Image: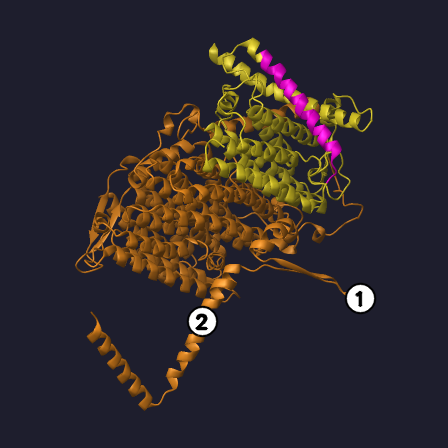
Chain colours: A yellow, B orange
Amino acid sequence: MALILDLLVQGSQMALVLALAPLLTGFVRKVKARLTRRQGASIIQPYRDLLRLLRKEVVLAQNASWLFRSAPYLIFATTWVAAALVPTFATGLYFSWTADLIALVALLGSARFYQALAGMDVGTSFGGIGSSREVMIASFAEPAMLLTVFTVALVAGSTQLSTIAEVMSSSHVGLRVSLGMALFAMIMVAIAENARIPVDNPATHLELTMVHEAMILEYSGRHLALIEFAASLKLLLYCSLIACIFMPWSLASAEAGPVAYLVGGVVYLGKLVLLGFALAVFETAIAKMRVFRVPQFLGAALMLSLLGTLLLFVSRTL
Amino acid sequence: MSGAAIEMSAVLALLGVAVLALVLSRREQATAIVYGATLVISVIALGNAAMRLIGDPAGVSDLVLPFGLPWLGAHFHLDALAGFFLVVINLGGAIASLYALGYGRHESAPHRVLPFFPAFLAGMNMVVMAADAFSFLFSWEFMSLVSWALVMSHHREADNARAGYVYLVMASLGTLALLLAFGLLAGPQGAYGFAAIKAGTHDPAISALVLALMLLGAGSKAGLVPLHVWLPLAHPAAPSHVSALMSGVMTKVAVYAFIRVVFDLIGQTSWWMSAVILLLGGITAVLGILQAMLEKDLKRLLAYSTIENIGIIFVGLGLALAFRGSGMGVAAALAFTGALFHVVNHSLFKSLLFMGAGAVLTATGERDMEKLGGLIHRMPQTSLAFLAGCLAISALPPLNGFVSEWLAFQAVLQSPQLPDWGLKILVPAIGGLMALTAALVAATFVKTLGIAFLGRPRSEAAERAKEVDMFSLTALFLLAGLCLIGGILPGLVIDALQPLSQALVGSRLPLQSAEPWLSIAPIAETRSSYDGMLVFVFIAVSAAAAAYLIHRLASRAVRRGPAWGCGFPEYSPVAQYSGASFAQPIRRIFATLVLGASETVTMPPPGDTAPARLTVVVVDPIWTKLYLPVTGAIGWTAERLNRLQFLTIRQYLSLVFGALITLLLVLALWP
C-alpha cells in the first residue's frame, strides 16, 4: 500500500512537470509582452502550439537519417526524466535516489548531444553553425554547472537533491559567500542553457547569430513539438533546481501526507511565478550579446563557481 | 594446473601461433587461421583470469620457469591486480581477433601483420604476469618491439616511418627509465623478485626517484604529457585492430606497471608525489582533448582522445594515493575504483571507436574526416555502434563512461578533508579541469560523428561506401553491448574491483550488489547514489511511450522535401560545415592560448578571381619547446663528435692513451 502511494506521488510529480512546463513558457512570454507594452498571446498559447504541431505532418529533409528522426524522442525523454527527478513540491520521492545532481547535469548533457548531432544530420550550414556554437557554449556552461554542483554538494555533504534541500532548509546553513557565488553562477548557466537573452534569443531563428533555433531549423510537425516541449521542460527544470537548492522553503518531506503536499505545491507555483517574472524582466532589460562575447559571460560563471568551490576547500564555514 | 600455469600456456600457445603465422603468412587462409587461433586462446585466457578475479580474489598462484637470470629463474604470478588487467587484455585481444577475421582480409601486407599480432598479445600477457624485474623488463621490451613492428607494417606510407622512429626512441627511453627504477628498488643486494622488493623498505629519496622514473617509463608508454608525442603518430599508423589494441589495451599495461610499482612495491608515499601525479593527469587530460578537437584525421583524433583518458585515469590514481597517504580509506577505495573502472571502460569504447574507424577505412579508404560524411545512410549498423561508442566516451548516462566519471567526481568531493594544504588547493582546480575536459570530450565526439557519419558525402569515396562484413559488425556490437552493460550494471564491476582496492589501498567500498534496484551508492545513499539501470529504463520507456502515443493519437504522416538552403538551389556538399569550421569557436577560445593556434586569411587583390585562402596553424608547444631543443642539442653534439671518425692513427693512439690514464686516475682517487 505504502509502495503504491509512493509510486503515485512520484507519478504525480512526473505528470506535474509535464503539465506545468508549457505554462511557465507561456507565462514568461506574456510578461515579456506586457513589459514591452504589447498585449501578447494568451498564457496557454504554448499548449495550443504544441497540439497544432503534433497534428501536422512531418516534412523531412531528403537527406535526413534515422538519427534525425529518433533524436526528438530521445531529447524529450532525457529532459523529462531529468526534470522529473528534481524535487518540486516534495523531497525524498520514491525514485529520487536514481540520479543525483551530477547525473542530472549529464542527462541534460546527453539531450544536448543528440540535439547537436541532429543539427548536423541534414548537412546544411545552418545546422552546423548552431551545433558548433552550442558545443562551444556547453564547453563553458557544463564545467561551470558541475563546479556549482561541487560547491552545493560540499556545503550539504551530499550530491542527492533531496538531502541538499533538507540541509539547505535547516537553520545551520545560513548566508554564505560560497553559496552566493554558486547562485550567481547557476543563474548565468541557466540563462545560457535555456538559450535566453543575452546568450541566445528564443523568439527568432532568422538571425545568423542564433544557436538553438539554428540547430532545429529543419524540424517540423511532431518532431518540432517534442523539441519545443523539451525546451520548456528544461526551463522548468532549471527553475525547479534553483528553487529547490536556494529557496527550499515549504518543501514537503517524503511521508508528509496530502495537506503538506498541497502546501508544497502552492508554494512551488509561487516560486515559479517569481523566477519566471524575474527572467522576463531581465530579458527585457538587456540586449543580446555577440557570440564571441558569450565565453566572457560564461567564463565569469566558471570563475565564480570555481571560487565558490575553492572557498569551501579552504574553510567549511565560508 | 594452477591459474598462472594456464595463463603461461596461453602465452606459449600465442607465441606458437606467431611462429605458425611466419610459416603460413603468404597463404590465402593464413588470416582466418591466425585470428581464429588468437580468438580461441584469448577467450581461454580471459576465462582463466576472470575465474581468478571472481572466484578466488585473495589467492596468488605462482610459477617459476627455468630461464631468465640464472640465480633467480623467471617468476610469474597471478594475483587480483594481474587478474584484472589480464581480463582487460584478453577481452580486448579476443574482440580484436574477432574483428580482424573480417577486417584482416583487406590487409595489403598480411605477412607484416600476422606473425606479430599473436606475439603482441603474448607480450602484453607476459608483462602483467611477470613477478621479477628481469622477466618484467624482458616482456616489456618484447611488447614494445613487436608493437613497433606492427606500427611499421605499412612502412611505405608517408608518415609511418617517422612514426615508427619516434616510437622506437620513446620506447627505448621508457625502458631505460624502468630499468633504472627496478635497479633502485632492488638495491645493492640485487633483490629482483617482486616479493623481495615488496618486503624491503625503501628510503624516501629512493621512492621519490623511483616515482619519477616510473612516470617517465610507464608514463611514456601510456601517453602522459609531456611524453605523449609519439602516441598520435604511432597508434594510427598500425592496422585498425592493432590501433584498437595499442590505444585500448597497451596503454593499460602501462597503467598496470605504474600501479604495480607505485601502489604495490614502493610502500609509503608522501603527499607531494600524489600532487605531481594529479597535476600531470589534469594537464594531460585537457591538452589531449583540445588536440583531439582540432584534429581532422579520424584515427589520430582517437589517439589524442586516448591521451585525454589516460589523464583521467592518472587523476584517479593520484587521488587514491593522496587519500591512502592521509589514511582516508573509503575515499582512497572510491578514487582507486573509479580509476580502474575507467581502465575497463576506456579499453571497451576506445577499441569500439578504433574498430569503427577501421570499418570506415575499409569502406572508403579515407581517414580524413573532411572527405567523409553521410555514412549513416550507407553504413547504418556501423554508425549505430559508433554512436554508442561516442555516447560512452562522452560520459553520458546510461552508458559506462558516465559511471567512472561519476565515481571520480565523488572522489573529488571527498577531498576537503585532506590535511595537506597543497592538495587542498590543487584538487578543486583539478576537478575544474576534469569538468572542462568532460564538456570538451562531448564537443569532440559530436564533431567526430557529425562530420564523418552525418551530413552529405564530401567525396566520391564516401558516396560509394558499403556496410562492412559480419565479423567486424559482430565485434562492434559486442563492444557496444558491453558499454551498455557496464553502464546499467555498474555495481557488478565495482564489486569485482574491491579485492584489488583492498590489496592496494587497504580499504574497500561497501558491497554494491546489496543495494536495492541495482543502484550504486559508494559511501551512503544519502550522500550520493546513481542507478544506471533505472535511468536507462526511464529514458527507454518515456521515449517509447511518447513515440507510440504520438503516432497513435496525433499524426504519423511524413513527407520528404528538399532541405532549406538559404535560398540557394542545389548547393554543393562543400558548403556544409566542415570539421575545421565546427572546431573554430573552441579553437579560437582555448587553442590560441594553449596550443598557439593562429589563422591567416590571404585575400587576392581586387579584380583578381583567385580564391581566398584561410590557413590555420596549430603547434604542439611541447614539441617545439621541449623536444626540438633536446633533439637539436643531440644533433649538435653528434656533429662535433663526428670529427672523431676522421683522426690520424697517432691521434687515435693518444686518445686511447689519454682515456686509459684518466680512467686509472679516477679509479685511484675513488674513495
Asked if badge 1 and badge 2 are on a common chain, one would say yes
* Residue at disc 1, secondary structure: loop
Q: Is residue A18 left or right of residue B249?
A: right
Residue type, label 1: Asp
Q: Is residue B371 left or right of residue B353?
A: right
Judge by depth and name the residue closer to the eye, B130 or B228: B228
Chain letter of the residue beneath label 2 in the structure image: B
Q: How many angstroms separate mark 1 from mark 2 (CA)? A: 47 Å
The answer to whether residue B26 is seen in the rendering is no
Q: Main secondary structure of the magenta part?
A: helix
Judge by depth and name the residue closer to the eye, B439 or B267: B267
Q: Nearer the viewer, mark 1 or mark 2?
A: 2
Q: Earlier in the sequence, mark 1 or mark 2?
A: 1
Would you name the residue on which mark 2 appears? B633
Residue type, label 2: Ala
Q: Which residues are magenta?
A: A262-288
Q: Is residue B648 left or right of residue A239?
A: left
The answer to if A284 sits in the magenta stretch is yes
Judge by depth and name the residue closer to the eye, A66 or A283: A283
Rendered-image quadrant of the C terminus of chain B: bottom left
Judge by depth and name the residue closer to the eye, B593 or A179: A179
Q: Quadrant of residue B113?
A: bottom left
Residue A281 lies, with reference to residue B408, above or below; the image says above
Would you name the residue on which mark 1 appears? B608
